[in-house]
Image: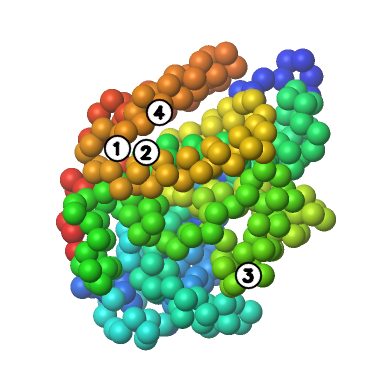
Amino acid sequence: MVLQLNYRTTLNEIIKHHVEIGVEVEKHRVTQNQSLSLKPFPENLSRDIQPYVKREFCTAQLEFTLPHSADPDLNVNLIGAVIKEVAQQLKPEEQIWHYSCPPQIPCPLEEVPISQAPEESNEYRRQSVLKYDVRRLLNNGTHINLSFSQEAIAYLMRELHFATRDDLYLQIAQYFMINRWLLTYLFGATPFAGQDYFDQHHLCGSVRSIRSSSLGFPNETRGDYRSVRHYIAAIDQAVANGELLQPREYYESVRLKSGNSKDPNRILKYGITHLELRTFDLNPLTISAVTPEQIRFIQLLALYFAYQPRLSGSQIQQLLAVAAEMNEQVALEAPTQQCAYATQGLTLLTELADFVERQQLEATFSEVLDQFRDCFIDADQTLAAQVLAQFDTY
């Protein structure tokens, strides 16, 4: 749909048709007794779904990669249909594991089968299992790739006085990084891990998100979001000093992306094409691992963040340091415990509601905000609390 840039343009038109979401979902194949499958990657999937299914780090992993769409319902329905079809085509003794933390591992850790394809990833994966505990590398998640149409970018740059497309995307990335604790609170869904996840149990009880905490997927390298050049330089320096094996190992919650490349230096030539939001646990209560409400919330946040004040470099550095501590605290809170930052969360949701009303967005967005506001009033309504109540530990 072409966006007509004139005085009648509304954000409602932009958010309905021009904030595109591409979803990537990682899931393991497991045996009937819920242990990691050691069988090779399924090569005989039907042609209609092969384009949507890719290899991941471990041969047991399936990555479902779906086309971009501005329609959350279309996104979720397609993801669910593809995952369901793949599940039906697996061998009878295999099924899909819908939880982020890995299942039981039926072999010595050094014998977990690692994908040999694509060939260019072999050396990186080999070094990764030498560097990290493979159990942490086996955490799965949902990645949300967010982009604006060219028409929407032109409108937002003119309306909000951004000099470049990169400046627009960078500001949104900054605010997602600063507020990622909010996403951990609402969408954290790993209150426990398997009995063999830790050598020695590090938890005294259930939490909101093991995967989003320091006990989850390896994520020790902090990014620099003051500018695009600072972002790239920080990753390059981490590779140069051996902190990262390759740029692709940069696992922060938000990546600035240019095309399909994992090399951030491509941004210098071609610019940012989208943001990759990597902070989400799989939602095990739905086969799609993500809900339309979650996608609508991300679309709304992206527009809202674009309208927020510009931040100086020193402000960003200070806020990111605080944000990392906040996210760790929220991730390790008990699922049914009131969030330490409930007041801040409710304030942000109120500001979002005002934004929806001011910009005359559809009532659907107000309904989404009401749903998530209830999660701050009653922690039992959060996803982590629901998973804890409905799933058995393993």
Give the image quarter of residue 345: top left
- Of the numbered discs 1 and 2, the one sitting upstream in the chain is 2
Cα–Cα gap, marks 1 and 2: 6 Å
Horizontal side, residue 117 vs residue 306: left or right: left
Numbered label attached to residue 382:
1
> Are there few (<14), some (14-19), or many (20+) residues within 10 Å of tag 2?
many
Looking at marks 1 and 4 on the same chain, the residue that comes earlier in the sequence is marked by: 4
Residue 33 rendering spot, x and y as whole percentages: 21, 73
| Nearer to the camera, 381 or 24 | 381
CB within 8 Å, label 3 to label 4: no
Disc number lying in front (4 or 2):
4
Q: Is residue 265 above or below residue 315?
A: below
Q: Residue at horizontal 70%, vertical 56%?
A: 232
Measure how far apart labels 1 and 4 are at the Cα level.
13 Å
Q: Read off the residue under disc 4.
A: 345
Q: Which mark is in front, 2 or 3?
A: 3
Figure quadrant of residue 90 = bottom left
Looking at the rendered structure, the secondary structure element under dot 4 is: helix
The mark nearer the N terminus, 3 or 4, is: 3
Residue 186 marker? 2
Q: Which residue is mark 3?
A: 241
